[in-house]
Amino acid sequence: MACDCSTTWVNIPEQCDLCDEPTFCRCSECQIKLCRSCSQEHHSQESTHNIAPYLTDKGEIKSTSVSCRIHFDKMCELFCQDCEAPVCQECITTGHHNYHELKNTQDLLHENKKTIERDTKEMENVLETELINIRKRLGVLVSTSSSKYEDLEEIVVQHGKKWHDAVEKVIETYVSEIQQMKTGEKDTLRQLTMEIVNLIYNTERSVKLNKEMLKVFEAEKILKYKTKADDIRSKIPEINVPNPSFTEFEVAESKIVHENFGVLKTKVMSIDDDRRNSRELHVVQTFLEHSFPKLMEKMTLLSSIETGLSAVYSLSCMENGELWVHGTDNSIMRTDRNHRKLERIKTMSFDGNVGITLKQEGELVYTDFEDRSVNILKNSQMHAVIRLSGWKPRDVCATLEGDLLVSMSNDDEKTAKIVKYRNTKALKEYHHDLRGRPLFPTGDTALHVTENRNWDVCVAVSSAQVVIVLNGLGAVRFKYSDKSGKKEFRPMGIATDGQCHILVTDYFNSRVHVLDKDGELLRHIEGHGIYLPLSVSVCNYDTIYIGDSTGKIKQIQHLK
């Protein structure tokens, strides 16, 4: 198709590759620059080649006109949506496009250009990041999948000893089922990992092709462009890993053994393709909702809560607005929105030696430094789930996977570490980095710990004046400290919100630092009567509760 010389062009210094005349067009197949006369001659010799408008290296559009493929001397001002092809006025008069939906090529060109740019931005900045995060999580799940089933096997075997020889067959049956579940889940996780790897490759390839398309700016290809992000989004799987359990029954010799042995509650992990293809996954919607910071320009103080304590060292908020708090006495207190005291739990420790967290089911978990225990409140009864020897627990955090991160110091108060527990079994210690170097300086034993929604372990090391963030494998992602305050940076409490922001109390400077997931400072929360803050908690992913040295808790909204 020959170039239309009536089209307005921008002056360009480049010369035709076949003569010395100025360049007007480019052959998409031969990749040569052509002047007006050479383009007509080239088209007569190679009628199937596509002669496209020429763009400068800066991507400036030399022409947005498209030659008609049927009437070579005509330019197309319209694009037929039904035929997906540009058409000229002569095409329309022939009647081939009667009742078809026609759009102005210039309008559609700019419309689709915006779609490509938006599509590319979403795939590059959102979908690719989400896929990489899922791949990281799948790697962690594959490496830790076996441990929970090994725990389950041990419970079954120990319970089976009570039944002696009569239950051996039942035990073998249950263990076999668990092995099948374990194998099925690992196979499914590996399959998901391969799918994610392929999807990341296709996403990166689409991003590259889109960028090349925008750079070369072939108008006809842009006009025909169909969004690819929707297809990628629909293929992103939701990771829903079942947690197996085993319920023991008391031995009843008068009944059938199998009926009274116990109940194995779990499901083999599977991929629900129908569900995945029938809707846009909730995990992507959630990620899109929380991907980019939406900090309020001006934060709002919602309330100031009087606790009756002289200081609030630890706190954790419930979904209904109630709070668990610990102060200077040897107790943990639950209060409601109206500051009424609803419940009190006695501890052996006081003055900040108690850490508080809430599991996803709303169960209270706390550490008792002097008792060397980690405890959980179930059905209004306290149970010690972990007891330490040679170590004393400091802080505790319930993870997204239902495990517990416990910070602790040894008896001589010189060494500190963080241990990840599943039920009562220690899964991993965070004590040294991947090169064997200590993570926490000697003598810095007051570690405050939380887990971010991207599975990073975030640690505030108070006396060392630093926040250390580790990935799930224990590698240091970054360290954060601050010298901008009038006084030294002393991180006493740490929490995260729904957008992976990290919130750290700065005790001596009476403020809270808000960091993004990569350790960049976004803002300070100060004023509002906050004085020497000791603790911080986030409720419903956006409301912040800050406990300070006056015994008051400030409820602040900082996200839109």
Image (cartoon, grey):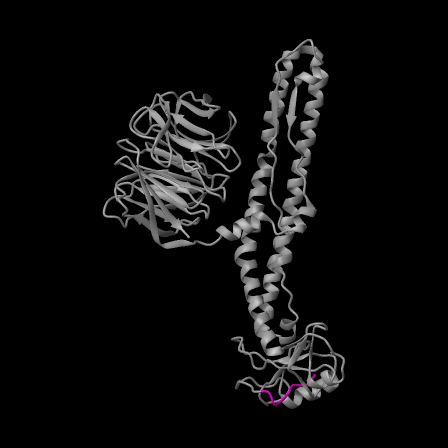
Magenta residue span: 1-7
Residue at 43% x, 49% y is 518
- Is residue 294 in sight in this rendering? yes
| Quadrant location, the N terminus | bottom right
Say left or right for 524 vs 186. Answer: left
Could you say where residue 292 lies in the image, as x and y percent from the top left?
Answer: 46, 54
Q: Quadrant of residue 313?
A: top left
Could you say where residue 74 lies in the image, as x and y percent from the top left?
Answer: 68, 87
Say left or right for 9 vs 269. Answer: left
Could you say where residue 166 lies in the image, as x and y percent from the top left?
Answer: 71, 11
Q: Residue furthest top?
A: 254
Say left or right for 138 vs 94. Answer: left
Q: For the image shown, how many numbered marks are present on the structure?
A: 0
Could you say where residue 531 lies in the image, as x and y percent from the top left?
Answer: 25, 41
Q: Residue furthest left?
A: 486
Give above or below for 358 relative to 99: above
Give above or below for 402 relative to 505: above
- Is residue 396 in sight in this rendering? no
Does residue 469 show up magenta in the picture? Answer: no
Give above or below for 391 relative to 281: above
Q: Main secondary structure of the magenta part?
A: loop
Q: Quadrant of residue 92?
A: bottom right
Front-most of 208 and 498? 498
Does residue 3 show up magenta in the picture? Answer: yes
